[in-house]
Amino acid sequence: MTAVRAIFLLTAGAIALGAPATAGAQKGKVVRVADGDSVVVRSGGHSHTYDLLGVDAPNAGECFATQARSALKHLLPRRAKVRLAGDPNGTRRGRYITRGSKLVNSAMLRAGAARAAGIDALRKAATLRSATNAAQGAGRGLFGACGGTGPTGPTGPAPPPPPGPVDNADRVRKALIGSQLVEFISTAQSSSRNTTRFCDGMRTDRHESFTGQIGSVQNDFAGSWAILGIDARPDGSLDAQILLTYDDPSNGQKSINITLAGDGTVTEQGVNASELQAGGPCSPPQHVGQLQNDNAAAHQQVQQLLVGKRFIDGAMTTDFCTATRAIRREGATTIDGTMTLETALVDQSGFVGIVSLRGTSANRRFAVFGDPGGPPFQMRDLGTTTDVAHNVTTGALSC
């Protein structure tokens, strides 16, 4: 099974590529406030950065940015106990955050410490809209201090644009190629020491060593590796999901989640400890074809496949007008916004792309996949809990 075909199957299933959590509220404790609309929360032994759903605070250097961060720190002090809940129409990291009986998302908007953004499709849209309308009507916070509807722009030199998906993928690749990641997992009954080697050409070798009540077991696997998804944190670190696809199909696949810190340190999530060491050569590939692993060439190829196509799902349509613009119509709602190709993977078996659409009133995220030789392609809405994929057709667009 080739790497992209394996990723195709995962994309069509229930993999954590971005569909927001829709289960019951998750409990945690505040570690720190990252900025005016995101916070680091520790839950289940792990710390993650979450965004306040429907809330858009000024960025650093913009009018009221400092006050917005201070307001959120007041609402969410360190070690505060909170509950987090996702929304089926929200973003991957977006959460409703509640402390006690107070919905922090609404409190930030009502204080005028931030603006509402992307709320139309959210379940709590009415609550968030009421809060921001009250702040705007009273001229509170940034609505009074920044002249009208929000931040007036940078007060000093404009900050450089944030790194894009290809930049982030390149950064992860450079950190891993030529190295090996050693992970340590232990319980009261067993212990494991596993080593994953990352070579150029996207080759990988993995050695697994397990010791428990049944004795000791060792296994060796050879295959390819791909960057399946990346999330950028406000502090500049990156969370990346790495997929290992073994040459022997009977061995299946392995997913590894890592964090790349700003200083270049790599740690693996979900293990007791991990260490990135210097690596050696990997075994040669056992199948024909080279994976274009989320690089500029793969992005360009997938963008060329998308532009001029219409995605039809029921009564809704998504038109890919250019490499950076798409229009989605959902009944009376039209999202005309910026299209970003987050991830692009291509080989002779097919292609997979993760696409985000950001409009002024709502955001959407999709997976698109198919044969690079031409349509029909398929797409799946990653904001839903279903695994239904829909065809993409050619024809007149509404751009």
Image: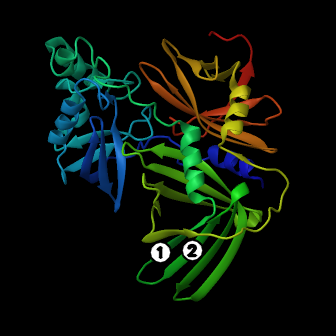
Give coordinates of residue 116: x percent, y percent.
31, 23
Q: Are marks 2 and 1 in contact (CB under 8 Å)?
A: yes
- Locate residue 354: give its quadrant: top right
198 displayed left or right of 20: right
- Locate residue 377: give its quadrant: top right
Q: Quadrant of the N terminus?
A: bottom right
Residue annotated with mark 2: 194
Which residue occupies the foreground of this view, 170 or 148? 170
Give coordinates of residue 267: x percent, y percent.
46, 62
- First along the sequence among labels 2 and 1: 1
Instruction: Report the amino acid beneath label 2.
Output: Asn
Give coordinates of residue 288: x percent, y percent.
85, 54
Q: Badge 1 local density, few (<14 within 10 Å), some, or many (20+)?
A: some
Q: Secondary structure at mark 2?
A: strand
274 displayed left or right of 223: left
Residue annotated with mark 1: 185
Residue that appears at 18% across and 41% down: 73
As measured in the structure, the alpha-carbon distance from the residue carrying label 2 to the one carrying label 1 is 8 Å
Up-down: is 87 above or below 227?
above
Name of the residue lying farthest toward the front: 157
Residue that appears at 64% across and 49% down: 10
Instruction: Report the amino acid beneath label 1.
Output: Ile
158 displayed left or right of 304: left
Up-down: is 108 above or below 332?
below
Give coordinates of residue 240: x percent, y percent.
52, 51
85 displayed left or right of 247: left
Determine which of the numbered discs, if any, sits on residue 337 in the image: none
Regarding residue 134, the answer to whether it shows in the image is no
Regarding residue 345, the answer to whether it shows in the image is yes
